[in-house]
Image: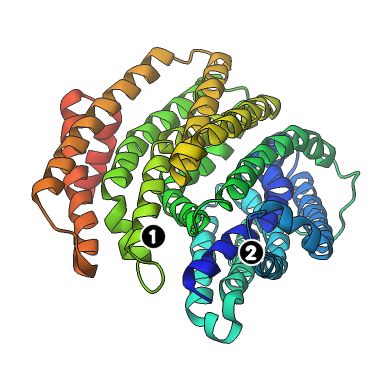
Amino acid sequence: PTRAYVCENYGAAFRLPDLIFQLIGGAALGSAFLPTFANHYVQKTQESAWRLASAAINLFTLAGGVAAAVCFIAAPAIVPLTVPGYTDAGREDTVYLTRIMLGSSVFFCASGLVTGVLNGRHHFLLPAFAPWVYNLSIIAGALLLQGPAGIAGPAWGVTIGAGLHLLVQLPGLRRIGMRYRPAAGLGTPGLGEVLRLMGPRILGLGSIQVNWLVTTVLASGLVAGSLAGLSYASAVAMLPIGVIAMAPAMAAFPQLAEAAAHREWNRYRDLLSSGLSHVLLLSFPAGAGLILLGFPVVALLFQRGEFDAASTRLTAQVLACLALGLPAHGVLEVVARGAYAMKDTKTPMLFAGLGMGVHAITSLLLVGPLEANGLSLAMSVSAWVEAAGLTVVVTNRTPGFDRRKLTRSIMQTGAATVFMAAVVWAWLAVGPSGAGPTGWLMTPLAGAIIGGLTFAAAAAQIGIPEIRSFLRLGRSD
Protein backbone atom coordinates (compact mmCIF):
# COMPACT_ATOMS: atom_id res chain seq x y z
CA PRO A 1 0.00 0.00 0.00
CA THR A 2 1.07 3.57 -0.60
CA ARG A 3 2.11 5.92 2.17
CA ALA A 4 -0.91 8.16 1.51
CA TYR A 5 -3.27 5.16 1.70
CA VAL A 6 -1.80 4.07 5.05
CA CYS A 7 -2.11 7.59 6.46
CA GLU A 8 -5.73 7.96 5.34
CA ASN A 9 -6.75 4.74 7.08
CA TYR A 10 -4.58 5.37 10.13
CA GLY A 11 -6.14 8.81 10.66
CA ALA A 12 -9.67 7.43 10.35
CA ALA A 13 -8.94 4.40 12.58
CA PHE A 14 -7.58 6.62 15.36
CA ARG A 15 -10.97 8.24 16.01
CA LEU A 16 -12.71 5.41 17.92
CA PRO A 17 -9.85 4.57 20.36
CA ASP A 18 -9.33 8.27 21.00
CA LEU A 19 -13.05 8.68 21.69
CA ILE A 20 -12.93 6.02 24.44
CA PHE A 21 -9.98 7.66 26.17
CA GLN A 22 -11.36 11.19 25.92
CA LEU A 23 -14.77 10.23 27.28
CA ILE A 24 -13.46 8.05 30.13
CA GLY A 25 -9.84 8.81 31.05
CA GLY A 26 -9.77 12.33 29.64
CA ALA A 27 -12.97 13.39 31.36
CA ALA A 28 -11.76 12.13 34.73
CA LEU A 29 -8.31 13.69 34.44
CA GLY A 30 -9.23 17.03 32.92
CA SER A 31 -12.02 18.16 35.17
CA ALA A 32 -13.32 15.86 37.85
CA PHE A 33 -10.50 13.91 39.46
CA LEU A 34 -7.75 16.42 40.08
CA PRO A 35 -9.80 19.10 41.94
CA THR A 36 -11.43 16.41 44.09
CA PHE A 37 -8.08 14.74 44.77
CA ALA A 38 -6.49 18.09 45.69
CA ASN A 39 -9.38 18.87 48.03
CA HIS A 40 -8.96 15.52 49.84
CA TYR A 41 -5.21 15.94 50.13
CA VAL A 42 -5.46 19.53 51.43
CA GLN A 43 -8.55 19.40 53.64
CA LYS A 44 -8.75 15.74 54.71
CA THR A 45 -5.96 13.14 54.96
CA GLN A 46 -3.31 11.67 52.69
CA GLU A 47 -4.78 8.22 53.26
CA SER A 48 -8.17 9.46 52.02
CA ALA A 49 -6.52 10.93 48.91
CA TRP A 50 -4.66 7.68 48.16
CA ARG A 51 -7.84 5.62 48.54
CA LEU A 52 -9.61 7.93 46.09
CA ALA A 53 -6.72 7.77 43.61
CA SER A 54 -6.58 3.95 43.75
CA ALA A 55 -10.32 3.57 43.30
CA ALA A 56 -10.37 6.02 40.37
CA ILE A 57 -7.47 4.32 38.57
CA ASN A 58 -9.05 0.89 38.97
CA LEU A 59 -12.57 1.95 38.03
CA PHE A 60 -11.70 3.96 34.92
CA THR A 61 -9.21 1.38 33.64
CA LEU A 62 -11.91 -1.27 33.96
CA ALA A 63 -14.42 0.99 32.20
CA GLY A 64 -11.93 1.63 29.40
CA GLY A 65 -11.35 -2.10 28.99
CA VAL A 66 -15.06 -2.86 28.76
CA ALA A 67 -15.61 -0.06 26.24
CA ALA A 68 -12.66 -1.24 24.14
CA ALA A 69 -13.96 -4.82 24.13
CA VAL A 70 -17.42 -3.72 23.01
CA CYS A 71 -15.98 -1.53 20.25
CA PHE A 72 -13.66 -4.34 19.14
CA ILE A 73 -16.68 -6.57 18.53
CA ALA A 74 -18.82 -3.82 16.99
CA ALA A 75 -16.08 -2.20 14.90
CA PRO A 76 -17.32 -3.60 11.54
CA ALA A 77 -20.64 -1.85 12.14
CA ILE A 78 -19.32 1.40 13.70
CA VAL A 79 -16.25 2.27 11.64
CA PRO A 80 -17.92 2.37 8.17
CA LEU A 81 -20.26 5.08 9.46
CA THR A 82 -17.27 7.40 9.96
CA VAL A 83 -15.81 6.92 6.45
CA PRO A 84 -18.75 6.78 4.04
CA GLY A 85 -16.55 7.88 1.14
CA TYR A 86 -14.17 4.90 1.44
CA THR A 87 -14.24 1.76 -0.71
CA ASP A 88 -15.05 -1.62 0.85
CA ALA A 89 -11.33 -2.45 1.03
CA GLY A 90 -10.61 0.88 2.70
CA ARG A 91 -13.31 0.28 5.30
CA GLU A 92 -11.98 -3.21 6.06
CA ASP A 93 -8.46 -1.92 6.56
CA THR A 94 -9.74 0.89 8.80
CA VAL A 95 -11.60 -1.69 10.95
CA TYR A 96 -8.40 -3.76 11.18
CA LEU A 97 -6.31 -0.78 12.33
CA THR A 98 -9.02 0.37 14.74
CA ARG A 99 -9.05 -3.00 16.49
CA ILE A 100 -5.28 -2.89 16.98
CA MET A 101 -5.35 0.62 18.42
CA LEU A 102 -8.24 -0.05 20.82
CA GLY A 103 -5.69 -1.45 23.26
CA SER A 104 -4.18 2.02 23.55
CA SER A 105 -7.40 3.41 25.03
CA VAL A 106 -7.17 1.02 28.00
CA PHE A 107 -3.58 2.02 28.75
CA PHE A 108 -4.45 5.70 28.42
CA CYS A 109 -7.40 5.45 30.81
CA ALA A 110 -4.96 4.24 33.49
CA SER A 111 -2.16 6.55 32.44
CA GLY A 112 -4.42 9.61 32.44
CA LEU A 113 -5.32 9.05 36.08
CA VAL A 114 -1.66 8.43 37.00
CA THR A 115 -0.82 11.75 35.35
CA GLY A 116 -3.55 13.41 37.42
CA VAL A 117 -2.16 11.98 40.67
CA LEU A 118 1.41 13.08 39.85
CA ASN A 119 0.32 16.56 38.76
CA GLY A 120 -1.83 16.84 41.86
CA ARG A 121 1.32 16.42 43.95
CA HIS A 122 3.26 18.89 41.74
CA HIS A 123 5.32 16.20 40.04
CA PHE A 124 5.58 17.10 36.34
CA LEU A 125 8.77 15.53 34.94
CA LEU A 126 7.51 12.02 34.16
CA PRO A 127 4.09 13.21 32.88
CA ALA A 128 5.94 15.59 30.54
CA PHE A 129 8.31 12.82 29.39
CA ALA A 130 5.55 10.26 28.73
CA PRO A 131 4.11 11.93 25.57
CA TRP A 132 7.58 12.00 24.02
CA VAL A 133 7.91 8.24 24.58
CA TYR A 134 4.46 7.74 23.06
CA ASN A 135 5.22 9.80 19.94
CA LEU A 136 8.61 8.14 19.47
CA SER A 137 6.88 4.76 19.61
CA ILE A 138 4.47 5.81 16.84
CA ILE A 139 7.41 6.96 14.70
CA ALA A 140 9.26 3.70 15.39
CA GLY A 141 6.14 1.74 14.44
CA ALA A 142 5.89 3.59 11.14
CA LEU A 143 9.60 3.22 10.34
CA LEU A 144 10.44 -0.23 11.73
CA LEU A 145 7.21 -2.23 11.77
CA GLN A 146 5.69 -1.32 8.42
CA GLY A 147 7.84 -3.99 6.76
CA PRO A 148 6.88 -6.99 8.90
CA ALA A 149 3.44 -5.67 9.94
CA GLY A 150 2.40 -3.84 6.77
CA ILE A 151 -0.19 -1.11 7.25
CA ALA A 152 -0.52 -2.17 10.91
CA GLY A 153 2.97 -0.87 11.79
CA PRO A 154 1.89 2.62 12.90
CA ALA A 155 -1.15 1.16 14.70
CA TRP A 156 1.02 -1.19 16.76
CA GLY A 157 3.24 1.81 17.49
CA VAL A 158 0.22 3.58 19.00
CA THR A 159 -0.72 0.69 21.29
CA ILE A 160 2.85 -0.03 22.39
CA GLY A 161 3.43 3.69 22.91
CA ALA A 162 0.34 3.97 25.10
CA GLY A 163 1.63 1.13 27.28
CA LEU A 164 4.99 2.89 27.59
CA HIS A 165 3.15 6.15 28.39
CA LEU A 166 1.81 4.39 31.48
CA LEU A 167 4.96 2.48 32.44
CA VAL A 168 7.32 5.47 32.48
CA GLN A 169 5.06 7.26 34.97
CA LEU A 170 4.61 4.43 37.48
CA PRO A 171 7.93 5.05 39.31
CA GLY A 172 6.63 8.55 40.09
CA LEU A 173 3.83 7.09 42.23
CA ARG A 174 6.39 5.51 44.56
CA ARG A 175 8.36 8.75 44.64
CA ILE A 176 5.36 10.73 45.92
CA GLY A 177 4.52 8.02 48.45
CA MET A 178 1.25 6.80 46.99
CA ARG A 179 -0.19 3.73 48.72
CA TYR A 180 -2.05 1.79 46.02
CA ARG A 181 -5.10 -0.35 46.87
CA PRO A 182 -6.46 -2.91 44.34
CA ALA A 183 -10.11 -2.36 45.29
CA ALA A 184 -12.41 -0.14 43.20
CA GLY A 185 -15.27 0.41 45.61
CA LEU A 186 -17.93 2.81 44.38
CA GLY A 187 -18.46 3.85 47.99
CA THR A 188 -14.94 5.29 48.26
CA PRO A 189 -15.21 8.86 49.64
CA GLY A 190 -14.84 11.37 46.81
CA LEU A 191 -15.43 8.92 43.97
CA GLY A 192 -19.11 9.85 43.75
CA GLU A 193 -18.14 13.50 43.38
CA VAL A 194 -15.71 12.59 40.59
CA LEU A 195 -18.47 10.72 38.76
CA ARG A 196 -20.90 13.60 39.25
CA LEU A 197 -18.45 16.16 37.88
CA MET A 198 -17.61 13.89 34.94
CA GLY A 199 -21.11 14.00 33.45
CA PRO A 200 -20.99 17.49 31.93
CA ARG A 201 -17.33 17.05 30.97
CA ILE A 202 -18.12 13.88 29.03
CA LEU A 203 -20.69 15.80 26.99
CA GLY A 204 -18.18 18.58 26.39
CA LEU A 205 -15.47 16.18 25.23
CA GLY A 206 -18.06 14.39 23.14
CA SER A 207 -18.56 17.61 21.20
CA ILE A 208 -14.86 17.58 20.28
CA GLN A 209 -15.19 14.05 18.96
CA VAL A 210 -18.31 15.04 17.04
CA ASN A 211 -16.28 17.84 15.44
CA TRP A 212 -13.68 15.36 14.28
CA LEU A 213 -16.37 12.95 13.12
CA VAL A 214 -17.94 15.71 10.99
CA THR A 215 -14.49 16.54 9.60
CA THR A 216 -13.71 12.87 8.87
CA VAL A 217 -17.03 12.23 7.15
CA LEU A 218 -16.78 15.33 4.97
CA ALA A 219 -13.08 14.81 4.20
CA SER A 220 -13.64 11.19 3.14
CA GLY A 221 -15.61 12.50 0.16
CA LEU A 222 -12.94 14.99 -0.97
CA VAL A 223 -9.93 14.47 -3.21
CA ALA A 224 -7.60 11.66 -2.10
CA GLY A 225 -5.15 12.80 0.55
CA SER A 226 -7.46 15.37 2.17
CA LEU A 227 -7.99 13.41 5.39
CA ALA A 228 -4.29 12.57 5.57
CA GLY A 229 -3.47 16.26 5.12
CA LEU A 230 -5.82 17.20 7.94
CA SER A 231 -4.30 14.53 10.19
CA TYR A 232 -0.73 15.60 9.44
CA ALA A 233 -1.49 19.30 9.81
CA SER A 234 -3.28 18.68 13.10
CA ALA A 235 -0.25 16.76 14.40
CA VAL A 236 2.07 19.65 13.52
CA ALA A 237 -0.28 22.23 15.03
CA MET A 238 -0.50 20.21 18.26
CA LEU A 239 3.25 20.55 18.85
CA PRO A 240 3.20 24.27 19.74
CA ILE A 241 -0.18 23.87 21.47
CA GLY A 242 1.33 21.19 23.69
CA VAL A 243 4.40 23.25 24.57
CA ILE A 244 2.78 26.68 24.78
CA ALA A 245 -0.61 25.89 26.27
CA MET A 246 -1.25 22.34 27.42
CA ALA A 247 1.91 21.82 29.47
CA PRO A 248 1.72 25.18 31.33
CA ALA A 249 -2.03 24.78 31.86
CA MET A 250 -1.56 21.29 33.30
CA ALA A 251 1.20 22.61 35.56
CA ALA A 252 -1.01 25.48 36.78
CA PHE A 253 -4.11 23.30 37.24
CA PRO A 254 -3.15 21.83 40.65
CA GLN A 255 -2.28 25.31 41.94
CA LEU A 256 -5.59 26.70 40.71
CA ALA A 257 -7.43 23.79 42.33
CA GLU A 258 -5.61 24.29 45.63
CA ALA A 259 -6.24 28.05 45.57
CA ALA A 260 -9.95 27.44 44.94
CA ALA A 261 -10.06 24.77 47.67
CA HIS A 262 -8.53 27.26 50.17
CA ARG A 263 -10.68 30.09 48.72
CA GLU A 264 -7.52 32.11 48.09
CA TRP A 265 -9.09 34.17 45.33
CA ASN A 266 -6.26 36.70 44.98
CA ARG A 267 -3.84 33.84 44.29
CA TYR A 268 -6.36 32.20 41.95
CA ARG A 269 -6.84 35.49 40.04
CA ASP A 270 -3.08 36.01 39.67
CA LEU A 271 -2.54 32.46 38.44
CA LEU A 272 -5.35 32.74 35.88
CA SER A 273 -4.25 36.18 34.66
CA SER A 274 -0.61 35.16 34.38
CA GLY A 275 -1.51 31.96 32.54
CA LEU A 276 -3.62 33.78 29.96
CA SER A 277 -1.04 36.50 29.38
CA HIS A 278 1.83 34.08 28.86
CA VAL A 279 -0.19 31.80 26.57
CA LEU A 280 -1.18 34.77 24.41
CA LEU A 281 2.40 36.06 24.33
CA LEU A 282 3.61 32.77 22.84
CA SER A 283 0.65 31.57 20.79
CA PHE A 284 0.21 34.63 18.58
CA PRO A 285 3.76 34.57 17.14
CA ALA A 286 3.74 30.76 17.01
CA GLY A 287 0.56 30.80 14.92
CA ALA A 288 2.00 33.41 12.58
CA GLY A 289 5.17 31.35 12.27
CA LEU A 290 3.23 28.24 11.23
CA ILE A 291 1.37 30.25 8.59
CA LEU A 292 4.54 31.76 7.11
CA LEU A 293 6.89 28.77 7.44
CA GLY A 294 4.39 25.92 7.15
CA PHE A 295 5.46 24.75 3.67
CA PRO A 296 9.14 24.05 4.47
CA VAL A 297 8.18 22.56 7.85
CA VAL A 298 5.73 20.12 6.26
CA ALA A 299 8.18 19.32 3.47
CA LEU A 300 10.97 18.61 5.95
CA LEU A 301 8.80 16.34 8.08
CA PHE A 302 6.79 14.44 5.47
CA GLN A 303 7.78 14.98 1.82
CA ARG A 304 9.19 11.66 0.71
CA GLY A 305 7.87 8.63 -1.16
CA GLU A 306 4.19 8.98 -2.03
CA PHE A 307 3.97 12.25 -0.06
CA ASP A 308 4.87 14.54 -2.96
CA ALA A 309 4.97 18.33 -3.46
CA ALA A 310 1.21 18.46 -4.05
CA SER A 311 0.61 16.71 -0.72
CA THR A 312 2.95 19.20 0.95
CA ARG A 313 1.06 22.16 -0.49
CA LEU A 314 -2.30 20.75 0.61
CA THR A 315 -1.06 20.02 4.14
CA ALA A 316 0.69 23.40 4.47
CA GLN A 317 -2.50 25.23 3.44
CA VAL A 318 -4.56 23.24 5.94
CA LEU A 319 -1.92 23.95 8.60
CA ALA A 320 -2.16 27.69 7.95
CA CYS A 321 -5.92 27.59 8.51
CA LEU A 322 -5.47 25.61 11.73
CA ALA A 323 -2.77 28.03 12.92
CA LEU A 324 -5.30 30.87 12.85
CA GLY A 325 -6.99 29.19 15.81
CA LEU A 326 -3.85 28.42 17.79
CA PRO A 327 -4.25 31.35 20.26
CA ALA A 328 -7.88 30.33 20.86
CA HIS A 329 -6.87 26.76 21.68
CA GLY A 330 -4.24 28.11 24.07
CA VAL A 331 -6.74 30.32 25.87
CA LEU A 332 -9.20 27.42 26.13
CA GLU A 333 -6.61 25.25 27.86
CA VAL A 334 -6.21 27.89 30.58
CA VAL A 335 -9.77 29.13 31.15
CA ALA A 336 -11.29 25.63 31.03
CA ARG A 337 -8.98 24.53 33.83
CA GLY A 338 -9.88 27.70 35.68
CA ALA A 339 -13.50 26.55 35.60
CA TYR A 340 -12.62 22.96 36.56
CA ALA A 341 -10.61 24.22 39.54
CA MET A 342 -13.87 25.72 40.84
CA LYS A 343 -15.52 22.32 40.24
CA ASP A 344 -17.58 23.82 37.43
CA THR A 345 -17.81 21.41 34.51
CA LYS A 346 -21.19 22.60 33.22
CA THR A 347 -20.07 25.97 31.83
CA PRO A 348 -17.25 24.52 29.66
CA MET A 349 -19.74 21.89 28.45
CA LEU A 350 -22.21 24.56 27.32
CA PHE A 351 -19.58 26.47 25.38
CA ALA A 352 -18.20 23.24 23.90
CA GLY A 353 -21.72 22.58 22.63
CA LEU A 354 -21.83 26.06 21.14
CA GLY A 355 -18.49 25.43 19.46
CA MET A 356 -19.76 22.12 18.10
CA GLY A 357 -22.73 23.82 16.47
CA VAL A 358 -20.57 26.58 14.99
CA HIS A 359 -18.12 23.97 13.69
CA ALA A 360 -20.79 21.87 11.99
CA ILE A 361 -22.45 24.85 10.31
CA THR A 362 -19.15 26.42 9.24
CA SER A 363 -17.85 23.09 7.91
CA LEU A 364 -20.91 22.58 5.74
CA LEU A 365 -20.69 26.15 4.42
CA LEU A 366 -16.94 26.08 3.67
CA VAL A 367 -16.25 22.51 2.52
CA GLY A 368 -17.74 23.18 -0.91
CA PRO A 369 -15.74 26.25 -1.96
CA LEU A 370 -12.58 25.59 0.11
CA GLU A 371 -12.54 21.77 0.51
CA ALA A 372 -9.98 20.64 3.16
CA ASN A 373 -9.02 24.26 3.88
CA GLY A 374 -12.64 24.98 4.71
CA LEU A 375 -12.76 22.11 7.21
CA SER A 376 -9.63 23.32 8.99
CA LEU A 377 -10.86 26.92 8.95
CA ALA A 378 -14.10 25.75 10.58
CA MET A 379 -12.05 24.31 13.45
CA SER A 380 -10.38 27.68 14.03
CA VAL A 381 -13.62 29.65 13.86
CA SER A 382 -15.36 27.38 16.37
CA ALA A 383 -12.33 27.50 18.71
CA TRP A 384 -12.42 31.32 18.76
CA VAL A 385 -16.16 31.38 19.50
CA GLU A 386 -15.80 28.85 22.33
CA ALA A 387 -12.70 30.53 23.81
CA ALA A 388 -14.19 34.03 23.76
CA GLY A 389 -17.42 32.99 25.46
CA LEU A 390 -15.79 30.85 28.14
CA THR A 391 -13.19 33.52 28.90
CA VAL A 392 -15.88 36.14 29.54
CA VAL A 393 -17.76 33.86 31.95
CA VAL A 394 -14.73 32.58 33.89
CA THR A 395 -13.14 36.02 34.28
CA ASN A 396 -16.48 37.48 35.40
CA ARG A 397 -16.60 34.88 38.17
CA THR A 398 -13.02 35.60 39.29
CA PRO A 399 -13.01 38.30 42.01
CA GLY A 400 -10.94 41.31 41.00
CA PHE A 401 -9.99 40.05 37.53
CA ASP A 402 -8.96 42.96 35.28
CA ARG A 403 -10.27 42.25 31.77
CA ARG A 404 -8.96 45.59 30.55
CA LYS A 405 -5.45 44.35 31.28
CA LEU A 406 -6.16 41.17 29.30
CA THR A 407 -7.53 43.20 26.35
CA ARG A 408 -4.45 45.42 26.44
CA SER A 409 -2.22 42.33 26.42
CA ILE A 410 -4.05 40.94 23.37
CA MET A 411 -3.69 44.20 21.44
CA GLN A 412 -0.02 44.66 22.34
CA THR A 413 0.85 41.06 21.49
CA GLY A 414 -1.11 41.32 18.24
CA ALA A 415 0.80 44.46 17.23
CA ALA A 416 4.17 42.82 17.92
CA THR A 417 3.06 39.74 15.96
CA VAL A 418 2.06 41.82 12.93
CA PHE A 419 5.46 43.51 12.93
CA MET A 420 7.22 40.16 13.25
CA ALA A 421 5.14 38.64 10.42
CA ALA A 422 5.97 41.57 8.12
CA VAL A 423 9.71 41.15 8.73
CA VAL A 424 9.64 37.37 8.19
CA TRP A 425 7.47 37.74 5.07
CA ALA A 426 9.91 40.30 3.63
CA TRP A 427 12.84 38.00 4.40
CA LEU A 428 11.11 35.07 2.68
CA ALA A 429 10.37 37.24 -0.36
CA VAL A 430 14.01 38.13 -0.94
CA GLY A 431 15.80 35.39 0.97
CA PRO A 432 16.12 31.61 0.66
CA SER A 433 14.72 29.47 -2.14
CA GLY A 434 13.71 26.82 0.37
CA ALA A 435 14.22 24.02 -2.19
CA GLY A 436 15.50 20.60 -1.20
CA PRO A 437 16.11 19.07 2.22
CA THR A 438 18.75 21.67 3.15
CA GLY A 439 16.42 24.54 2.29
CA TRP A 440 13.52 22.87 4.10
CA LEU A 441 15.68 22.67 7.23
CA MET A 442 17.39 26.06 7.07
CA THR A 443 14.36 28.13 6.04
CA PRO A 444 12.18 27.44 9.10
CA LEU A 445 15.22 27.47 11.39
CA ALA A 446 16.43 30.86 10.16
CA GLY A 447 12.85 32.16 9.97
CA ALA A 448 12.21 31.13 13.57
CA ILE A 449 15.36 32.91 14.75
CA ILE A 450 14.56 36.07 12.78
CA GLY A 451 10.93 36.01 13.87
CA GLY A 452 11.75 35.32 17.51
CA LEU A 453 14.28 38.15 17.75
CA THR A 454 12.00 40.55 15.90
CA PHE A 455 9.03 39.71 18.10
CA ALA A 456 11.07 40.03 21.30
CA ALA A 457 12.39 43.44 20.22
CA ALA A 458 8.93 44.67 19.23
CA ALA A 459 7.36 43.36 22.45
CA ALA A 460 10.03 45.02 24.56
CA GLN A 461 9.61 48.29 22.67
CA ILE A 462 5.82 48.19 23.07
CA GLY A 463 6.24 47.43 26.76
CA ILE A 464 4.59 44.02 27.12
CA PRO A 465 5.31 43.09 30.77
CA GLU A 466 5.53 39.32 30.25
CA ILE A 467 8.41 39.63 27.78
CA ARG A 468 10.68 40.82 30.56
CA SER A 469 10.53 37.48 32.36
CA PHE A 470 11.61 35.66 29.19
CA LEU A 471 14.43 38.13 28.56
CA ARG A 472 15.63 37.80 32.15
CA LEU A 473 15.52 34.00 31.77
CA GLY A 474 17.64 34.24 28.65
CA ARG A 475 20.22 36.46 30.38
CA SER A 476 20.36 34.16 33.41
CA ASP A 477 21.37 31.26 31.19
- Observer able to see residue 75: yes
When the figure is inspected, residue 127 is found, relative to residue 320, above or below; the finding is below
- Distance of label 2 from label 1 (alpha carbons): 35 Å
User: Where's the N terminus, which quadrant?
Assistant: bottom right
When the figure is inspected, residue 445 is found, relative to residue 49, above or below; the finding is below
Left or right position of 82 against 431: right
Q: Tag 1: Cα neighbours inside 10 Å, few (<14), some, or many (≥20)?
A: many
Residue at coordinates 29% horizontally, 54% vertically from top-left?
Answer: 295
Q: Nearer the viewer, residue 366 or 413?
A: 366
- Which numbered mark, 2 or 1, is in the foreground of this view? 1
Q: Quadrant of residue 302?
A: bottom left
Residue at coordinates 38% horizontally, 13% vertically from top-left?
Answer: 404
Residue at coordinates 29% horizontally, 28% vertically from top-left?
Answer: 413
Q: Tag 2: Cα neighbours inside 10 Å, few (<14), some, or many (≥20)?
A: many
Which residue was labeled with disc 1? 311
Q: Position of residue 135 (x, y in %)?
A: 50, 64
Q: Amino acid at mark 2?
A: Leu
Q: Nearer the viewer, residue 318 or 133?
A: 318
Mark before the other along the chain sequence, 2 or 1 = 2
Left or right position of 307 against 9: left
As drawn, the label of residue 166 is 2
Kindly state the secondary structure of the residue where label 2 is placed: helix
Q: Quadrant of residue 358?
A: top right
Kindly state the secondary structure of the residue where label 1 is placed: helix
Left or right position of 416 against 179: left
Q: Amino acid at mark 1?
A: Ser
